[in-house]
Image (cartoon, helix red, strand yellow):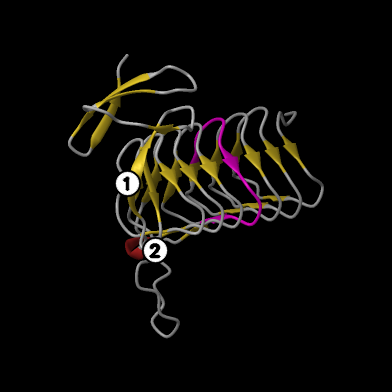
């Protein structure tokens, strides 16, 4: 069967991995057996995708990112260069925790973005269209559309689906770039359909 994705000649694609049509995998990347990658994804240089990782469609993973078992990335997710994802909360070399019962799931919902060199501690959910600033350390869940940064990452604002920061006034916002409209209620921002 003809492969319908591109993999650079230096990439290692294990038999038993699933890769969607139109996906591009660049230099020195490794896709392990049991990994599932959707359509039209772009994986940069030196990316590792472990067994059991699930990646949706149109996901962009920049250079030097490793995703370990327990990571789930929905559609349209962005992972900046050298962003770090863990899967074991309390690792010890002398007391190995390398079996699935020790892995904590990390979920990036549709449209979420993680900036360069950010660290995502396992067991958290990054809400849809949330945005993690470069160099941040995320230790807890991030709501939909929320902008977080710092160490530890804290909420600093709200983001539009298009990636522009929203200015919320009287619990309402219109994106200056794309004109999408939003309502805010407590710690939730929702797009008005």
70 w.r.t. 95: above or below: above
Residue wearing tag 2: 151
Q: CA distance from mark 2 to mark 1?
A: 14 Å
Residue wearing tag 1: 142
- Asked which quadrant contains residue 40, the reply is top right
Judged from this view, the residue extending furthest toward the front is 169
Q: Secondary structure at mark 2?
A: loop
Residue that appears at 21% across and 27% down: 170
Residue that appears at 35% across and 31% down: 167
Residue 85 place in picture, x, y as percent: 47, 58
Judged from this view, the residue extending furthest toward the top is 193
The question of residue 179 being in magenta is answered with no
For the residue carrying disc 2, how many other residues have a C-alpha within 10 Å: few (<14), some (14-19), or many (20+)?
few
Residue 143 place in picture, x, y as percent: 30, 41
Residue 28 place in picture, x, y as percent: 74, 55
* Callouts 2 and 1 close, C-beta under 8 Å: no
Residue 186 place in picture, x, y as percent: 17, 36
Q: Nearer the viewer, mark 2 or mark 1?
A: 2
Judged from this view, the residue extending furthest toward the bottom is 94
> Which quadrant holds the C terminus?
top left
Q: Which mark is residue 121?
A: none
Residue that appears at 30% across and 50% down: 141
Left or right for 118, reference 142? right
Judged from this view, the residue extending furthest toward the left is 186
What's the magenta region? Answer: 55-67
183 w.r.t. 59: above or below: above
Left or right for 39, reference 113? right
The question of residue 56 being in magenta is answered with yes
């Amino acid at each position: 069967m003809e492969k319908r994705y591109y993999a650079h000649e230096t990439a290692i694609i294990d038999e038993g991995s699933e890769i969607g049509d139109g996906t591009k995998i660049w230099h020195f990347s490794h896709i392990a057996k049991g990994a599932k990658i959707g359509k039209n994804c772009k994986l940069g240089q030196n990316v590792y995708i472990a067994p059991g990782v699930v990646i949706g469609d149109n996901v962009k993973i920049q250079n030097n990112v490793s995703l370990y078992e327990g990571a789930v990335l929905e559609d349209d997710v962005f992972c900046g260069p050298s962003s770090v994802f863990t899967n074991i909360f309390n690792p010890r070399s002398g007391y190995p925790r390398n079996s699935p019962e020790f892995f904590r799931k990390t979920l990036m919902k549709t449209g979420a973005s993680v900036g360069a060199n950010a660290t995502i501690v396992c067991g958290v959910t990054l809400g849809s269209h949330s945005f993690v600033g470069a160099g941040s350390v995320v230790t807890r869940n991030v709501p939909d559309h929320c902008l977080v940064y710092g160490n530890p990452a804290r909420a600093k604002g709200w983001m539009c689906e298009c990636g522009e920061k929203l200015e919320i006034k009287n619990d309402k916002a219109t994106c200056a770039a794309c004109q999408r409209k939003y309502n805010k209620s407590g710690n939730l921002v929702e797009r008005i359909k």
